[in-house]
Amino acid sequence: MALRFPEINVGVVGVGFIGVAHVEALRRIGVNVMGVVGSSPERARIKAEAANLPHVYESYEAMLADPAIHVVHIASPNHAHAEQVRMALDAGKHVICEKPLALSSADTSDLVARASASGLIHAVCFNIRFYPSAHQAAAMVRSGDIGAPRFVTGSYLQDWLLLPTDWNWRLEPESAGGLRSVADIGSHWLDLARFITGKRVTEVMADLHTFVPIRTHPSGPVETFAAASGDAELIEEPMTSDDGAGILLRFEDGARGQAAISQVSAGRKNSVSIEVDGAASALSWRSEDPDKLWIGHRGAPNQVLTRDPSLLAPEAARVTAYPAGHVEGYPDTFRALFNEVYKDVASGGPSADPTYPTFTDGHDAVCVTEAVARSAQEERWITVER
Ligand code: SOE
């Protein structure tokens, strides 16, 4: 079958769980995924065979040197993002980077400046806001349906790091950065809260905790969400990063919020929830039942809006692909996000008001998470510096 954008060639860095999600979603929107790069060509070839990935480049440099590549997707461990983004921009490639955009706001602000000056397209993969119900919630807030947002509450809970034997590069500060649950999944929740309310977080008060102070791990890598294989030589590692966090939030315009973030919540595989209580009505959404948006009223029966393109606001209908009753989930959010980005790629440059998260959003998220880290350390409210 002919590709929708046969003239757009893409390379993906990272062949873990998320890199594969990128390749699958790119294939769905009809761009030409030319090749991938892994931490080593051997590992990438094994993964390419197992997950039906395209050609394996020998190195990131080799991928960037390929004049046929127009867009680079970065789904490597966090510490590599900043340098890989710089190299891609220098090579004249459009960039879609996984979160966090970089490990420090000094780096993210540098990347925003470079990307803006380059005229290239830049996006950060905050895919959770691309559940159609999240877009619907944002559209309803914008059109005043719930009145001014006042109180924003919710959580992002997982259980894949519950046991002391659970291991992945995200537990290594040199690969992931000093923050863990907050940077890895809290950043998604914060982006979602900002996207739905349209308000930026101005101050935070946070409590971070390491519930599993010592972990053991095999000498080799363990894939995200995978159990470590039985290895005779287990290495003991003292842990310092956050398994979980409680965060109080103050938004511009006075709204308040509370988020619970954890990667050690048994039974919660990948569970995002958010409620926005407005001056007139409320909205509530859970990723475990993603096609439903609850609308709460004081003086009338509550409602549940099931995702149905014909009933959604135009902004939400635009990011949905399946008819009502055919539930859209996690992989569909990547398709929806990339679909928006590639409209700009096809037109040659960023639109004035992109419909997808850009490096500016990536910078904002890192500024908030840095304030979270400082607040936990100093045990006081911290103003977000941007
Ligand atoms: C692991 O916690 C992870 O893969 C995150 O890194 C992703 O951003 C999230 O979408 C799913 O969980």
Image (cartoon, grey):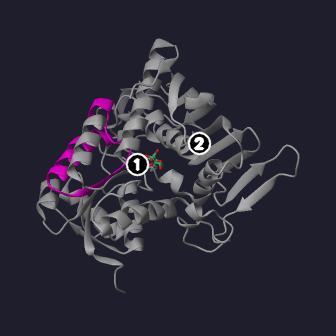
Res 157 quadrant in image? top right
The vertical placement of 338 against 323, above or below, is above
**Mark 1 burial class by Cα count in 10 Å: few <14, some 14-19, many 20+:** few
- Helix, strand or loop status at disc 1: loop
Judged left or right of residue 30, residue 71 is left
Residue extending farthest to the bottom is: 1
Is 242 magenta? The answer is no
Res 92 quadrant in image? bottom left
Nearer-N-terminus badge (2/1): 2
Give the residue at x 34% y 32%. Answer: 177
The vertical placement of 58 against 240, above or below, is below
Quadrant assignment for the C terminus: top left
Nearer-the-camera pick, 359 or 268: 359
Q: Which residues are magenta?
A: 78-107
**Mark 1 residue type:** Ser
Nearer-the-camera pick, 233 or 80: 80
**Mark 2 residue type:** Thr
- Helix, strand or loop status at disc 2: helix
The numbered mark at residue 229 is 1
Instruction: Please state the horizontal and vertical placement of residue 279, each as a whole percent of the image.
Output: 74, 38
Res 34 quadrant in image? bottom left
The Cα atoms of the two marked residues, 2 and 1, are separated by: 43 Å
Nearer-the-camera pick, 159 or 282: 282
Is 104 magenta? The answer is yes
Residue 104 showing in the rendered view: no
**Mark 2 burial class by Cα count in 10 Å: few <14, some 14-19, many 20+:** many
Judged left or right of residue 50, residue 89 is left
Instruction: Please state the horizontal and vertical placement of residue 234, each as a whole percent of the image.
Output: 36, 36
Q: Which residue is mark 2?
A: 197
Instruction: Please state the horizontal and vertical placement of residue 272, each as a whole percent of the image.
Output: 59, 46
